[in-house]
Amino acid sequence: MAIGILLVGSGVAHLVVWAVLGGPWEGPVSWRKPILFGVSGGLTSLSLGWAWSKLPWRWGDAWLASSVAWALFVEVALIDLQAWRGVASHFNRATPFDSWLYDTMGVLILWVTLIAIDLTIRFFRQSTGLAADMLLAVRAGLVLLVISCLLGIWVSVNGDMRVAAGLEPERYGAAGVPKFPHGAVIHALQWLPMLAWAARQAGFTERWRVSLVAAATAGTSLIGVFALAQTLAGRSRFDVTPSTGVVLAGGIALFVVPLLTIGVALAHHPRVTAVPSRPAGPTAARRAGP
């Protein structure tokens, strides 16, 4: 947990640095990567640790959980290092040192991906004691996290191939953005369990909570499909076609409707129950008079 909080703090701190020093948000050399990777890596570390705590403990779990947290910490630290050096952190093979740092980050993310796959399999095979809605949220979040990690590996491989061909690394086709589908679903492990928790606070029955989480999961998945379709077609994020537009609209609707439903229910759900007054005892009755 400490490493996750530290990483989120690092991302927020670099947001302050960017506000003070300025500079571009996009591009291979910017403060965007320390900010986003710090917050994203920290949230991922925290949510993986939380998910781990819901499984029956097995030998080696402590070491595996620690290794994932440290892998994310070192990856973000290397990205921060390159940002402070004023050089690109990704697809940078300008010097042997830069190339070694980039390859090290790749190995670390591959390790996190393998552990996330193992954790996902365990959630489908082992008893957790979680309610059906929360179990669905965690399973779906882990599956989407694994997909995001695999897409991240594809981003790296595609970028290296394009660099070797003398092309811009962070593109696919004419204008596709490979990191778009990678980022579209990476945080489902945070928002789906939060949605399940909020639905419980709003007083929904388990059946309704499962339906709400299922709808949000479908919506998140469709948004990911939209992002991947745009990229593979060589289109930018906003160059939407009628077919991909339908997918996007469906995904947004399936994601937003559960949020609105829960929000309305929370607004009308009684949070404070009045404490019944105690009946007056003999002393109080005497004080009250006849």
Image (cartoon, rainbow, N blue to C red):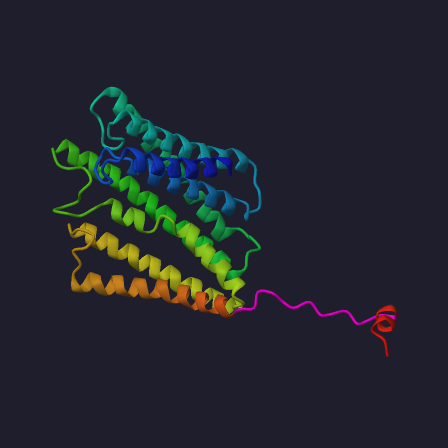
**Relative to residue 266, is residue 21 depicted above or below?**
above
- Count all numbered tags in the image, as a single digit: 0
On the rendered image, what quadrant is the C terminus found in?
A: bottom right
Q: Residue 64, how many percent across, how many down? A: 49, 35
Residue in the picture at 14% in, 47% down = 175
Q: Nearer the viewer, residue 176 or 76?
A: 76
Q: Residue 161 appears at what percent x and percent y?
A: 18, 35
Which residues fall within the magenta stretch? 269-282
Query: In the figure, residue 101 lies in which quadrant?
Result: top left
Left or right of 246? Residue 115 is right
Residue appearing at x 53%, y 63% in the figure: 200
Is residue 29 left or right of 12 when viewed as pictured?
Answer: left
Percent position of residue 172, x then y: 17, 44
User: Secondary structure of the magenta portion, mostly?
Assistant: loop
Asked whether 275 falls inside the magenta stretch, the response is yes
Q: Residue furthest top?
A: 96
Quarter residue 77 falls in = top left
Q: Position of residue 275 (x, y in %)?
A: 69, 67
- Comparing 204 with 287, the one in front is 287
33 falls in the magenta region: no
**In the displayed structure image, the side of residue 91 where residue 283 appears, left or right:** right
Foreground residue among 233 and 200: 200
On screen, 24 above or below 269? above
User: Which residue is found at the position 42% from the left and 50% from the top?
Assistant: 189
